[in-house]
Image: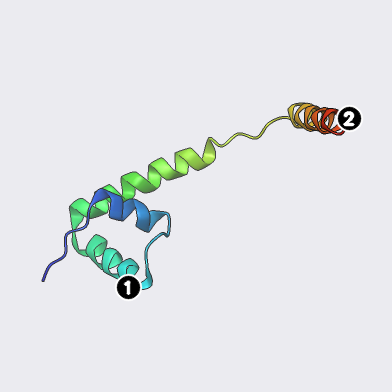
Amino acid sequence: MIKTFTQDDVIRYVYEETSGSEHEEIMQAIICDSELQDLYKEIVAVKTQLDESMKTPSDKVTQNILNYSKSLNLLSRK
């Protein structure tokens, strides 16, 4: 029986959210199916762009959040 994999399956594969046997099946399907290879490459490219666009707050913003949290904690103790 030939199993058909969906875009969701490939996304789960890229994010390593598949079981061991499923991982192997999807990998083999990607190797054998040029359309699935193209989809895989596209999803990997999008994931890479998302990973590179991750931003972290400045130290000032982090400190402001911590100070605000401390002030709320002090108010709740009164």
Q: Please give left or right for residue 35 compared with residue 58 in the image.
A: left
Residue 61 image point, x, y percent: 74, 27
CA distance for labels 1 and 2: 57 Å
Residue 62 image point, x, y percent: 75, 32
Q: Which residue is mark 1?
A: 21
Residue 47 image point, x, y percent: 43, 44
Residue 32 image point, x, y percent: 20, 64
Label 2 sits on a secondary structure element that is loop
Q: Please give left or right for residue 32 compared with residue 14 in the image.
A: left
Q: Please give left or right for residue 66 compared with residue 45 in the image.
A: right
Q: What amino acid type is highlighted by mark number 2?
A: Lys
**Which residue appears at 31% of the width and 68% of the height?**
22
Q: Residue furthest front?
A: 78
Q: How is the image coloured?
A: rainbow
10 is higher (above) or lower (below) than 51 = below
**Which residue appears at 82% of the width and 33% of the height?**
73
**Which residue appears at 38% of the width and 48% of the height?**
44
Q: What amino acid type is highlighted by mark number 1?
A: Ser
**Which residue appears at 21% of the width and 57% of the height?**
5
Q: Nearer the viewer, mark 1 or mark 2?
A: 2
10 Å neighbourhood of mark 1: few (<14), some, or many (≥20)? few
10 Å neighbourhood of mark 2: few (<14), some, or many (≥20)? few
Q: Which residue is mark 2?
A: 78
User: Is 20 in front, or is 31?
Assistant: 20
Task: Give residue 78's quadrant in the image.
Answer: top right
User: Is 24 in front, or is 74?
Assistant: 74
75 is higher (above) or lower (below) than 25 = above
User: Is 61 in front, or is 32?
Assistant: 61
User: Of marks 1 and 2, which one's residue comes earlier in the chain?
Assistant: 1
